[in-house]
Protein backbone atom coordinates (compact mmCIF):
# COMPACT_ATOMS: atom_id res chain seq x y z
CA UNK A 1 0.00 0.00 0.00
CA UNK A 2 1.33 3.38 -0.91
CA UNK A 3 2.03 5.92 1.76
CA UNK A 4 -0.23 8.95 1.56
CA UNK A 5 1.30 12.33 1.07
CA UNK A 6 2.09 14.17 4.32
CA UNK A 7 -0.45 16.88 3.61
CA UNK A 8 -3.19 14.34 2.84
CA UNK A 9 -2.55 12.32 6.05
CA UNK A 10 -2.68 15.43 8.17
CA UNK A 11 -6.06 16.34 6.72
CA UNK A 12 -7.43 12.84 7.34
CA UNK A 13 -6.34 12.87 11.03
CA UNK A 14 -7.87 16.28 11.56
CA UNK A 15 -11.15 15.13 10.01
CA UNK A 16 -11.30 12.12 12.30
CA UNK A 17 -10.69 14.28 15.39
CA UNK A 18 -13.46 16.65 14.30
CA UNK A 19 -15.91 13.78 13.83
CA UNK A 20 -15.11 12.36 17.30
CA UNK A 21 -15.59 15.72 19.01
CA UNK A 22 -18.84 16.30 17.14
CA UNK A 23 -20.16 12.94 18.31
CA UNK A 24 -19.29 13.82 21.87
CA UNK A 25 -21.10 17.15 21.63
CA UNK A 26 -24.16 15.43 20.21
CA UNK A 27 -24.06 12.86 23.01
CA UNK A 28 -23.81 15.56 25.66
CA UNK A 29 -26.68 17.45 24.05
CA UNK A 30 -28.77 14.32 24.23
CA UNK A 31 -27.92 13.83 27.90
CA UNK A 32 -28.97 17.38 28.71
CA UNK A 33 -32.50 16.40 27.76
CA UNK A 34 -32.43 13.22 29.86
CA UNK A 35 -33.77 12.51 33.37
CA UNK A 36 -32.91 15.01 36.11
CA UNK A 37 -33.67 14.52 39.82
CA UNK A 38 -34.53 17.90 41.31
CA UNK A 39 -34.75 17.23 45.05
CA UNK A 40 -36.25 15.16 47.85
CA UNK A 41 -38.64 17.02 50.16
CA UNK A 42 -39.30 15.60 53.62
CA UNK A 43 -39.00 16.88 57.19
CA UNK A 44 -35.73 16.36 58.98
CA UNK A 45 -37.63 15.76 62.25
CA UNK A 46 -41.00 14.17 62.94
CA UNK A 47 -42.77 13.68 66.28
CA UNK A 48 -43.57 10.11 67.24
CA UNK A 49 -47.16 9.28 66.37
CA UNK A 50 -47.51 11.89 63.62
CA UNK A 51 -47.93 11.14 59.88
CA UNK A 52 -45.60 12.55 57.25
CA UNK A 53 -45.19 13.07 53.52
CA UNK A 54 -42.11 12.14 51.48
CA UNK A 55 -41.86 13.95 48.12
CA UNK A 56 -39.45 13.13 45.32
CA UNK A 57 -39.23 15.83 42.63
CA UNK A 58 -37.75 14.92 39.24
CA UNK A 59 -37.78 16.11 35.61
CA UNK A 60 -38.02 13.47 32.87
CA UNK A 61 -37.27 15.93 30.04
CA UNK A 62 -37.76 13.82 26.86
CA UNK A 63 -37.64 10.45 28.67
CA UNK A 64 -40.51 8.28 29.86
CA UNK A 65 -40.75 7.16 33.49
CA UNK A 66 -39.91 3.56 34.19
CA UNK A 67 -39.96 3.42 38.02
CA UNK A 68 -39.73 5.32 41.30
CA UNK A 69 -38.34 3.36 44.24
CA UNK A 70 -37.99 4.29 47.91
CA UNK A 71 -35.41 2.82 50.29
CA UNK A 72 -34.88 3.14 54.03
CA UNK A 73 -31.32 2.39 55.09
CA UNK A 74 -30.78 0.75 51.65
CA UNK A 75 -33.82 -1.54 51.99
CA UNK A 76 -36.60 -1.06 49.43
CA UNK A 77 -40.06 -0.53 50.92
CA UNK A 78 -42.05 1.05 48.05
CA UNK A 79 -41.97 1.13 44.27
CA UNK A 80 -44.08 2.85 41.64
CA UNK A 81 -44.16 1.41 38.09
CA UNK A 82 -46.65 3.15 35.78
CA UNK A 83 -46.70 0.10 33.48
CA UNK A 84 -48.17 -2.13 36.20
CA UNK A 85 -51.68 -2.31 37.68
CA UNK A 86 -51.84 -1.12 40.35
CA UNK A 87 -48.72 0.98 39.80
CA UNK A 88 -47.86 1.39 43.50
CA UNK A 89 -46.68 -1.45 45.71
CA UNK A 90 -45.43 -1.35 49.33
CA UNK A 91 -43.22 -3.88 51.12
CA UNK A 92 -43.22 -4.64 54.84
CA UNK A 93 -40.52 -2.82 56.74
CA UNK A 94 -40.55 -2.06 60.51
CA UNK A 95 -41.32 1.60 61.18
CA UNK A 96 -42.56 2.32 57.64
CA UNK A 97 -46.35 2.18 57.26
CA UNK A 98 -47.16 3.34 53.72
CA UNK A 99 -50.67 4.43 52.75
CA UNK A 100 -50.65 3.20 49.13
CA UNK A 101 -54.02 4.79 48.35
CA UNK A 102 -52.64 8.27 49.10
CA UNK A 103 -49.23 7.74 47.48
CA UNK A 104 -48.22 8.39 43.87
CA UNK A 105 -45.18 8.55 41.60
CA UNK A 106 -43.70 11.58 43.33
CA UNK A 107 -45.33 11.51 46.78
CA UNK A 108 -45.32 8.96 49.57
CA UNK A 109 -47.56 9.09 52.65
CA UNK A 110 -46.54 7.37 55.91
CA UNK A 111 -49.45 6.91 58.31
CA UNK A 112 -47.67 7.04 61.66
CA UNK A 113 -44.09 7.54 62.75
CA UNK A 114 -42.48 5.50 65.52
CA UNK A 115 -38.91 5.14 66.73
CA UNK A 116 -38.13 2.62 63.97
CA UNK A 117 -39.17 5.17 61.34
CA UNK A 118 -35.90 7.03 61.93
CA UNK A 119 -33.21 6.52 59.30
CA UNK A 120 -31.85 7.50 55.87
CA UNK A 121 -34.44 7.64 53.08
CA UNK A 122 -33.48 7.33 49.40
CA UNK A 123 -35.54 8.15 46.32
CA UNK A 124 -34.43 6.41 43.12
CA UNK A 125 -35.92 7.37 39.74
CA UNK A 126 -35.30 5.38 36.53
CA UNK A 127 -36.13 6.40 32.96
CA UNK A 128 -37.46 4.03 30.30
CA UNK A 129 -35.85 3.30 26.92
CA UNK A 130 -33.81 4.47 25.23
CA UNK A 131 -31.71 6.12 27.99
CA UNK A 132 -32.54 3.80 30.95
CA UNK A 133 -30.86 6.40 33.12
CA UNK A 134 -31.18 6.20 36.93
CA UNK A 135 -30.71 9.00 39.45
CA UNK A 136 -31.06 8.95 43.24
CA UNK A 137 -30.76 11.14 46.32
CA UNK A 138 -31.24 10.67 50.06
CA UNK A 139 -32.10 12.54 53.26
CA UNK A 140 -31.98 11.68 56.96
CA UNK A 141 -35.10 11.59 59.13
CA UNK A 142 -35.05 11.78 62.94
CA UNK A 143 -37.94 10.89 65.24
CA UNK A 144 -38.45 12.95 68.40
CA UNK A 145 -40.44 11.85 71.44
CA UNK A 146 -42.07 14.58 73.53
CA UNK A 147 -43.15 14.11 77.15
CA UNK A 148 -46.85 13.39 77.51
CA UNK A 149 -47.15 16.02 80.23
CA UNK A 150 -45.08 18.72 81.86
CA UNK A 151 -42.08 17.85 84.02
CA UNK A 152 -42.71 16.59 87.55
CA UNK A 153 -41.58 18.69 90.52
CA UNK A 154 -40.87 16.58 93.60
CA UNK A 155 -39.66 17.32 97.10
CA UNK A 156 -41.73 20.42 97.83
CA UNK A 157 -43.29 20.96 101.25
CA UNK A 158 -46.73 22.51 101.84
CA UNK A 159 -45.19 25.36 103.84
CA UNK A 160 -41.79 26.96 104.32
CA UNK A 161 -40.45 29.32 106.95
CA UNK A 162 -37.95 32.04 106.23
CA UNK A 163 -34.53 30.40 106.55
CA UNK A 164 -35.71 26.90 105.59
CA UNK A 165 -33.75 25.05 102.92
CA UNK A 166 -35.75 24.37 99.76
CA UNK A 167 -34.53 21.15 98.12
CA UNK A 168 -36.57 20.06 95.11
CA UNK A 169 -36.00 18.10 91.91
CA UNK A 170 -37.49 18.41 88.42
CA UNK A 171 -37.98 15.26 86.34
CA UNK A 172 -38.65 14.94 82.60
CA UNK A 173 -39.35 11.37 81.53
CA UNK A 174 -39.29 9.45 78.26
CA UNK A 175 -38.04 12.01 75.75
CA UNK A 176 -35.85 11.84 72.67
CA UNK A 177 -33.47 13.60 72.53
CA UNK A 178 -32.91 14.33 76.25
CA UNK A 179 -34.88 17.29 77.60
CA UNK A 180 -33.08 20.43 78.71
CA UNK A 181 -34.40 21.49 82.13
CA UNK A 182 -34.45 24.98 83.63
CA UNK A 183 -35.59 26.26 87.02
CA UNK A 184 -37.41 29.55 87.69
CA UNK A 185 -38.33 31.24 90.98
CA UNK A 186 -41.19 33.71 90.62
CA UNK A 187 -40.53 33.90 86.88
CA UNK A 188 -36.78 34.54 87.13
CA UNK A 189 -34.34 31.89 85.94
CA UNK A 190 -32.21 30.40 88.70
CA UNK A 191 -28.45 30.83 88.63
CA UNK A 192 -26.48 27.63 87.89
CA UNK A 193 -24.80 27.51 91.31
CA UNK A 194 -28.17 26.64 92.92
CA UNK A 195 -28.83 23.77 90.50
CA UNK A 196 -27.65 20.16 90.60
CA UNK A 197 -27.36 18.38 87.25
CA UNK A 198 -27.95 14.64 87.53
CA UNK A 199 -26.82 12.01 84.96
CA UNK A 200 -29.24 11.32 82.10
CA UNK A 201 -30.73 7.82 82.14
CA UNK A 202 -31.55 5.89 78.94
CA UNK A 203 -34.17 3.15 79.21
CA UNK A 204 -34.67 -0.05 77.19
CA UNK A 205 -36.85 1.82 74.67
CA UNK A 206 -33.95 4.19 73.97
CA UNK A 207 -35.80 7.10 75.61
CA UNK A 208 -34.09 9.54 77.94
CA UNK A 209 -34.97 10.59 81.50
CA UNK A 210 -33.56 13.92 82.72
CA UNK A 211 -33.52 15.47 86.19
CA UNK A 212 -32.33 18.76 87.66
CA UNK A 213 -32.12 19.62 91.36
CA UNK A 214 -32.64 23.01 93.01
CA UNK A 215 -31.36 23.89 96.48
CA UNK A 216 -31.52 27.28 98.19
CA UNK A 217 -32.42 28.94 101.48
CA UNK A 218 -35.84 30.59 101.57
CA UNK A 219 -35.69 34.34 102.08
CA UNK A 220 -38.42 36.93 102.46
CA UNK A 221 -37.68 38.23 98.95
CA UNK A 222 -38.72 34.86 97.53
CA UNK A 223 -42.31 35.32 98.71
CA UNK A 224 -44.81 37.62 97.04
CA UNK A 225 -48.00 37.91 99.10
CA UNK A 226 -46.95 34.85 101.02
CA UNK A 227 -46.40 32.54 98.06
CA UNK A 228 -43.39 31.45 96.06
CA UNK A 229 -43.74 30.02 92.55
CA UNK A 230 -41.32 27.28 91.55
CA UNK A 231 -41.37 26.57 87.82
CA UNK A 232 -39.49 23.99 85.78
CA UNK A 233 -39.42 23.90 81.98
CA UNK A 234 -38.47 20.93 79.82
CA UNK A 235 -37.32 21.75 76.29
CA UNK A 236 -36.64 19.13 73.62
CA UNK A 237 -34.22 20.25 70.90
CA UNK A 238 -35.01 23.93 71.43
CA UNK A 239 -38.31 23.69 69.54
CA UNK A 240 -40.71 21.88 71.86
CA UNK A 241 -41.21 23.03 75.45
CA UNK A 242 -43.47 22.09 78.36
CA UNK A 243 -43.46 23.48 81.89
CA UNK A 244 -44.82 22.72 85.35
CA UNK A 245 -45.31 25.08 88.25
CA UNK A 246 -45.81 24.63 91.98
CA UNK A 247 -46.83 27.29 94.46
CA UNK A 248 -45.51 26.96 98.00
CA UNK A 249 -46.61 28.98 101.02
CA UNK A 250 -44.53 30.78 103.64
CA UNK A 251 -45.43 30.32 107.29
CA UNK A 252 -43.58 32.45 109.83
CA UNK A 253 -45.47 32.00 113.11
CA UNK A 254 -42.43 33.09 115.07
CA UNK A 255 -39.02 34.54 114.35
CA UNK A 256 -36.24 32.53 112.82
CA UNK A 257 -33.66 34.18 115.06
CA UNK A 258 -32.50 36.77 112.53
CA UNK A 259 -32.25 40.43 113.42
CA UNK A 260 -34.35 41.55 110.44
CA UNK A 261 -36.79 44.27 111.40
CA UNK A 262 -40.11 42.72 110.54
CA UNK A 263 -43.21 42.06 112.61
CA UNK A 264 -44.60 38.61 113.31
CA UNK A 265 -48.24 37.56 113.44
CA UNK A 266 -49.19 34.76 115.82
CA UNK A 267 -52.42 32.99 116.65
CA UNK A 268 -53.66 32.46 113.09
CA UNK A 269 -55.14 29.16 112.00
CA UNK A 270 -54.41 27.33 108.77
CA UNK A 271 -57.93 28.05 107.44
CA UNK A 272 -61.16 29.77 108.47
CA UNK A 273 -64.89 29.31 107.91
CA UNK A 274 -67.46 32.04 107.96
CA UNK A 275 -68.47 32.53 111.59
CA UNK A 276 -65.09 31.52 113.02
CA UNK A 277 -63.32 33.82 115.47
CA UNK A 278 -60.05 35.38 114.33
CA UNK A 279 -57.80 36.22 117.29
CA UNK A 280 -54.29 37.21 116.21
CA UNK A 281 -51.48 39.31 117.63
CA UNK A 282 -48.92 41.35 115.75
CA UNK A 283 -45.60 41.66 117.59
CA UNK A 284 -42.58 43.75 116.71
CA UNK A 285 -39.27 44.13 118.49
CA UNK A 286 -36.28 46.38 117.87
CA UNK A 287 -33.47 48.23 119.61
CA UNK A 288 -33.83 51.91 120.47
CA UNK A 289 -37.00 53.95 120.79
CA UNK A 290 -40.31 52.11 120.51
CA UNK A 291 -43.07 52.73 118.05
CA UNK A 292 -45.39 55.52 119.18
CA UNK A 293 -47.85 54.33 121.86
CA UNK A 294 -50.83 55.65 119.98
CA UNK A 295 -50.40 52.80 117.49
CA UNK A 296 -50.59 50.12 120.20
CA UNK A 297 -53.81 48.74 121.64
CA UNK A 298 -54.08 46.92 124.99
CA UNK A 299 -50.50 45.65 125.17
CA UNK A 300 -47.72 47.65 126.87
CA UNK A 301 -44.17 47.80 125.56
CA UNK A 302 -42.13 44.86 126.89
CA UNK A 303 -38.33 44.89 127.21
CA UNK A 304 -36.67 41.60 126.24
CA UNK A 305 -33.54 40.10 127.80
CA UNK A 306 -31.65 40.84 124.59
CA UNK A 307 -32.26 44.54 125.11
CA UNK A 308 -34.81 44.75 122.33
CA UNK A 309 -38.23 46.24 122.99
CA UNK A 310 -41.31 44.34 121.89
CA UNK A 311 -44.57 46.02 120.93
CA UNK A 312 -47.75 44.02 120.36
CA UNK A 313 -51.11 44.84 118.82
CA UNK A 314 -54.10 42.54 119.13
CA UNK A 315 -56.90 41.94 116.63
CA UNK A 316 -60.09 40.02 117.39
CA UNK A 317 -63.19 39.68 115.20
CA UNK A 318 -65.71 37.19 113.82
CA UNK A 319 -65.33 36.16 110.21
CA UNK A 320 -68.07 37.38 107.88
CA UNK A 321 -68.53 36.70 104.17
CA UNK A 322 -67.88 40.37 103.45
CA UNK A 323 -64.31 39.97 104.69
CA UNK A 324 -63.44 37.86 101.64
CA UNK A 325 -62.50 39.19 98.22
CA UNK A 326 -62.13 36.44 95.61
CA UNK A 327 -62.17 33.88 98.44
CA UNK A 328 -59.27 35.60 100.24
CA UNK A 329 -59.16 37.69 103.41
CA UNK A 330 -56.01 39.71 104.01
CA UNK A 331 -54.75 40.85 107.40
CA UNK A 332 -51.75 43.15 107.39
CA UNK A 333 -49.71 44.48 110.29
CA UNK A 334 -47.35 47.42 109.69
CA UNK A 335 -44.66 48.54 112.14
CA UNK A 336 -43.69 52.20 111.71
CA UNK A 337 -40.42 53.44 113.21
CA UNK A 338 -39.65 56.85 114.71
CA UNK A 339 -36.54 58.94 114.15
CA UNK A 340 -34.10 59.94 116.92
CA UNK A 341 -36.69 62.09 118.76
CA UNK A 342 -35.68 65.40 117.26
CA UNK A 343 -38.53 65.39 114.78
CA UNK A 344 -41.91 63.83 114.09
CA UNK A 345 -42.26 60.09 113.47
CA UNK A 346 -40.88 58.90 110.15
CA UNK A 347 -44.30 57.51 109.33
CA UNK A 348 -47.44 59.05 110.75
CA UNK A 349 -49.87 56.89 108.79
CA UNK A 350 -49.78 53.67 106.79
CA UNK A 351 -50.31 55.67 103.61
CA UNK A 352 -47.15 57.76 103.97
CA UNK A 353 -44.74 57.87 101.05
CA UNK A 354 -42.10 55.10 101.28
CA UNK A 355 -39.39 57.62 100.47
CA UNK A 356 -40.13 59.39 103.77
CA UNK A 357 -40.50 56.27 105.89
CA UNK A 358 -38.86 53.28 107.47
CA UNK A 359 -41.29 50.45 108.04
CA UNK A 360 -41.84 46.75 107.75
CA UNK A 361 -45.01 44.78 107.45
CA UNK A 362 -46.47 41.28 107.56
CA UNK A 363 -49.57 40.28 105.63
CA UNK A 364 -51.75 37.17 105.90
CA UNK A 365 -54.06 35.95 103.17
CA UNK A 366 -56.71 33.74 104.78
CA UNK A 367 -58.66 31.46 102.46
CA UNK A 368 -62.40 30.95 102.65
CA UNK A 369 -65.76 32.11 101.25
CA UNK A 370 -69.40 32.65 102.10
CA UNK A 371 -70.04 29.05 101.01
CA UNK A 372 -67.85 27.93 103.95
CA UNK A 373 -65.08 26.70 101.70
CA UNK A 374 -61.66 27.00 103.29
CA UNK A 375 -58.19 27.08 101.82
CA UNK A 376 -54.60 27.41 102.97
CA UNK A 377 -53.03 30.20 104.99
CA UNK A 378 -50.66 32.50 103.14
CA UNK A 379 -48.07 34.82 104.67
CA UNK A 380 -45.89 37.50 103.14
CA UNK A 381 -43.14 39.77 104.42
CA UNK A 382 -42.19 43.24 103.26
CA UNK A 383 -39.38 45.50 104.39
CA UNK A 384 -38.64 49.04 103.28
CA UNK A 385 -36.11 51.48 104.70
CA UNK A 386 -35.35 54.97 103.46
CA UNK A 387 -31.75 55.52 102.49
CA UNK A 388 -30.80 51.81 102.77
Image (cartoon, rainbow, N blue to C red):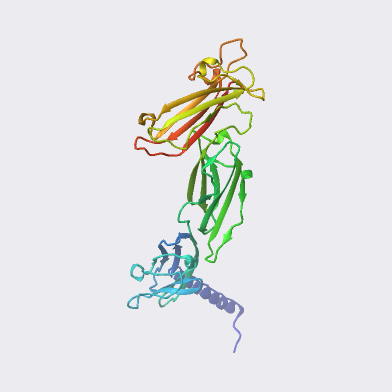
Which residue is most to the bottom?
A: 1
Total tally of numbered discs in the picture: 0
Which residue is most to the right?
A: 306
Quarter of the figure with residue 113: bottom left
Between 57 and 175, the residue placed more toward the observer is: 175
Q: Quadrant of the C terminus?
A: top right
Q: Identify the residue at horizontal 52%, vertical 19% (top origin).
A: 296
Between 91 and 371, the residue placed more toward the observer is: 371
Q: In the rendering, at what x and y percent does residue 67 appear?
A: 40, 74
Q: Is residue 376 above or below residue 77?
A: above
Q: Taking the image as drawn, is residue 26 in sight?
A: no
Q: Is residue 85 left or right of residue 238?
A: left
Q: Is residue 262 above or below residue 349?
A: below
Q: Is residue 18 left or right of residue 96?
A: right
Q: Identify the residue at horizontal 46%, vertical 53% (top origin).
A: 149
Q: Taking the image as drawn, is residue 242 in sight?
A: yes
Q: Identify the residue at horizontal 61%, vertical 56% (top origin).
A: 199
Q: In the rendering, at what x and y percent does residue 238 appear?
A: 52, 51
Q: In the rendering, at what x and y percent does residue 134 appear?
A: 46, 73
Quarter of the figure with residue 131: bottom left
Between 26 and 158, the residue placed more toward the observer is: 158
Q: Quadrant of the N terminus?
A: bottom right
Q: In the rendering, at what x and y percent does residue 132 appear?
A: 44, 76
Q: Is residue 244 above or below residue 375?
A: below
Amino acid sequence: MRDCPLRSCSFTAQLRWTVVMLCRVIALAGLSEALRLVRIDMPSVVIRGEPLWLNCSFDLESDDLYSVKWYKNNTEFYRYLPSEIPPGQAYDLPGVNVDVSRSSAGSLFLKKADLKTEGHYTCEVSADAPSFETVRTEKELKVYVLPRKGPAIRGTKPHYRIGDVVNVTCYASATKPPAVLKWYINGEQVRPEYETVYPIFRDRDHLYHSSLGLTFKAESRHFAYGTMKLKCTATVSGAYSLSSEKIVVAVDAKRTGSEDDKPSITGAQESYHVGDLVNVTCSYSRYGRPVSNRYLVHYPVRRLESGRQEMSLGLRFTVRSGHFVRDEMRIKCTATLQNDGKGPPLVTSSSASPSDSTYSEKEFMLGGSSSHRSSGLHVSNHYDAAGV
